[in-house]
Image (tube, coloured by chain):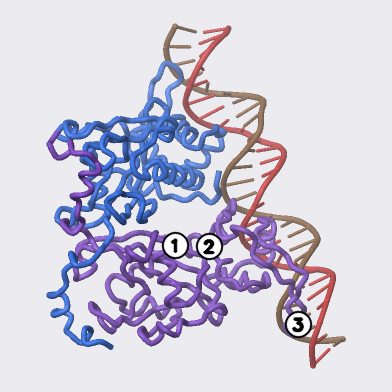
Chain colours: A purple, B blue, C red, D brown
Amino acid sequence: MTNEVLKSEAEFLSQYNIHDYDIPLACVDMVIFAIIQHKLHVLLTRRNEHPSFGQWALPGGFIDVNQDKTLDDTAHRKLFEKTGIRSPYLEQVQTVGDVHRDPRGWSLTVLYFALIDYSDIMINQANGAKAEVQWLDIGEATQLQLAFDHSQLLLKAIARLKSKTRYTALPIGLMPELFTLTELQSIFEVILGHELDKKSFRRRVLDAGVLQPTECYKRSGKRDAQLYRVGDMAENFEFPRAL
Amino acid sequence: MTNEVLKSEAEFLSQYNIHDYDIPLACVDMVIFAIIQHKLHVLLTRRNEHPSFGQWALPGGFIDVNQDKTLDDTAHRKLFEKTGIRSPYLEQVQTVGDVHRDPRGWSLTVLYFALIDYSDIMINQANGAKAEVQWLDIGEATQLQLAFDHSQLLLKAIARLKSKTRYTALPIGLMPELFTLTELQSIFEVILGHELDKKSFRRRVLDAGVLQPTECYKRSGKRDAQLYRVGDMAENFEFPRAL
DNA sequence: TAAATAGTGTCTTTTAGACAATATGGT
DNA sequence: ACCATATTGTCTAAAAGACACTATTTA
């Protein structure tokens, strides 16, 4: 036992300076999902700083230790800066870190995804001036060469969303305030990449009790469709069987 | 667009010094699970440094940017230091970060869990001198007041293990080279906290094809039991229905 | 033969898949 | 009446739950 450890904790802390150590850079990156014209889209931003200046990338950036109290705060802040949205469904996917992913040095990023209702969006004006953003279909987005390892991060987030769509009610987070069962089913189909049986789908979500039926109907030229609202914690509901 | 961004990337990087910024501390913490005497245990270490000197904690520590090429390397290194084990089943659980969790400042930790076969263990001697370690039953471990927010981290890892045990073959990672179906079932029961039906359990794992039957039998006083071996990627197998 | 543990048979229940049938609203 | 879409009925299939039964080994 060295002399070092015999000091009091207070004494130890008073002499501790994080700038004395080599530590990794820490960021948060976000995959922001929304449904646009019946297709799954993600938000990309064009980098307006080095490194990878000018390349498309996932929205994200350093944890700001003065501004963010928690890691989720960083994610919420990034999301708000790009979309003006404050209360999305937010889920941490994975943390990736190594020596090579950022030319500035050993870096790690905590990857999140957010599900938002596209009709809620008001692209933040103040930020619109600083950073160019675009919504891309995930087919196009995964073809693009994104900055850093963001292409891989995007794939991880898509894989998580698809996987959880098989056994949870996650995609509910993409729906507007009121929606029909047919609309919800079509979102599940878009994410999963294949069609679902109508009766099975309705039975599944209705029996689960994750939706609140309303008295309202959507008139769309043909037969009216009943409108539903999301119940509490619906996104995290786990079905007993996977699709 | 500032003058700043007009520099070349090489020029930018040459002037970049991570010590100029306030960035969070980054560590990896591990929940190392093993079955000992038919109970789920975790490995704890007593801290031999400030802060929280002398308190019990999860094994873990800073990412060493010189030694670790990736985040998983840090986890493997920590695991090897405490157990001498090189190839466990390793899974990242979650990353937790905020201003308060460490008195040295804004810190984040990437939480992993490892599943190991207790009979594989050779506590690393060199390290045994530096740090006191103990295996505790999860009932006892969750009662203890661990350093930092490690009690909460422990609960998160246990929750993840329990949850995945309901719909995957994860606990296979805790088994020795050869084992009987009754032994495997008992591990599932210990983790889930309730009994399972023998026929259903056997049907489930055998139909899944995650086990390789051997020609060997275990003689244990009563009727011999057939021994099985783990198949490839068995831990990640997902059953179509949850228990 | 009895006790204990390993392993099987089989009926029920739950929930998804398939697909036909009915209901409603607009033209 | 006809079409398109919403909604329901119902049979089948897959996989878990319940529980009784048979098989093997040793004392």
Rendering coords of residue A139 (x, y %): 43, 78
Of labels 3 and 1, earlier in sequence is 1
The chain under label 1 reads A
Residues marked 3 and 2, same chain: yes
Mark 3 highlights which residue?
A222
Of labels 3 and 2, earlier in sequence is 2
CA neighbours of label 1 inside 10 A, class few (<14), some (14 to 19), many (20+): some
Up/down of B131 relative to D5, above or below: above
Q: Is residue B177 visible?
A: no
Where disc 1 sits, the SS reads helix
Residues marked 3 and 1, same chain: yes
Q: Which residue corresponds to the image point at 35% horizontal and 29% vertical from the top-left?
A: B216
> Gap in Å between the C-alphas at discs 2 and 1?
8 Å
Where disc 3 sits, the SS reads loop
Q: Are marks 3 and 2 in contact (CB under 8 Å)?
A: no
Q: Which residue corresponds to the image point at 42% horizontal and 27% vertical from the top-left?
A: B38
Amino acid tagged 1: Arg
User: Residue B233, labelled with which disc?
Assistant: none
User: Residue A165, labelled with which disc?
Assistant: 2
